Image (cartoon, rainbow, N blue to C red):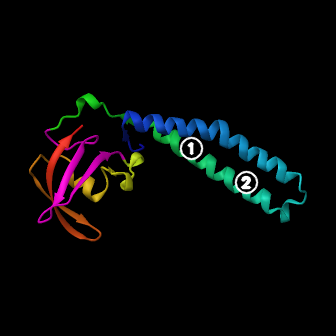
Amino acid sequence: MAKQTVITDEGLKKLEAELEELKTVKRKEVAEKIKVALGYGDLSENSEYDEAKNEQAIIEGRIAEIENQLKNVRVLDETEIGTENVHIGSTVTVHEKGKKTKETYRIVGSTEADPLGGRISDESPIGKALLGHRKGDEVEVETPGGVLFLIVDEISK
């Protein structure tokens, strides 16, 4: 059985929009590239054709990946998210023990993760460690760079 993907409503809309773009626009663009490349003749030495076929394979692979994710998706009900504990969908402000600098993360499903945008996966070391904790808790996080001790300052929706 495939793994269930937890996703926010916003994330679902983005995935559906990407799928629509791939199916309606990108497929047609790559089909046109293949058609043009076929006009160049001998396929054994036709780099444009090879490139277009590779692009087609990438697009079809991404379409299949998104369709599979959508079959096993559970949309997070934002009304179920409380501010007592950290959950997927929570926005959490933390600081490292002994430091003043605060970081704010939104805990999301793996398909929506964007660490540079402050959206971390519930499967990432920090995201996984924060789940279930309350304001004021000290959380030990095993990261590739070593152990961090984070203090939960605030939890919001």
Front-most of residues 95 and 23: 95
Please, is residue 98 above or below residue 33 in the view?
Answer: below
Name the kind of residue labelled 1 in the image.
Ala
Q: Helix or strand or loop: what does disc 2 sit on?
A: helix
Front-most of residues 154 and 46: 154
Q: What distance separates the C-alpha of mark 2 from that of mark 1? A: 16 Å
Please, is residue 95 above or below residue 26 in the view?
Answer: below
Q: Residue at x 10, y 52 (%)?
A: 137
Direction from residue 25 to residue 147 in the image, left or right: left
Name the spot of residue 2 as percent of width and height, x first: 42, 44
Direction from residue 64 to residue 109 in the image, left or right: left
Foreground tag (2 vs 1): 2
Q: Residue at x 89, y 60 (%)?
A: 42
Q: Which residues are magenta?
A: 84-109
Direction from residue 73 to residue 43 in the image, left or right: right
Counting other residues with Cα less than 10 Å from the Cα at mark 2, is it few (<14), some (14-19), or many (20 or more)?
Answer: some
Q: Which residue is mark 1?
A: 64
Q: Residue at x 66, y 52 (%)?
A: 57
Name the spot of residue 37 as percent of width and height, x first: 83, 53
> Which label number is shown at residue 121?
none
Question: Is-magenta flag for residue 51?
Answer: no
Name the spot of residue 71 as percent of width and height, x first: 47, 36
Quadrant of image for the C terminus: top left
Q: Which residue is mark 2?
A: 53
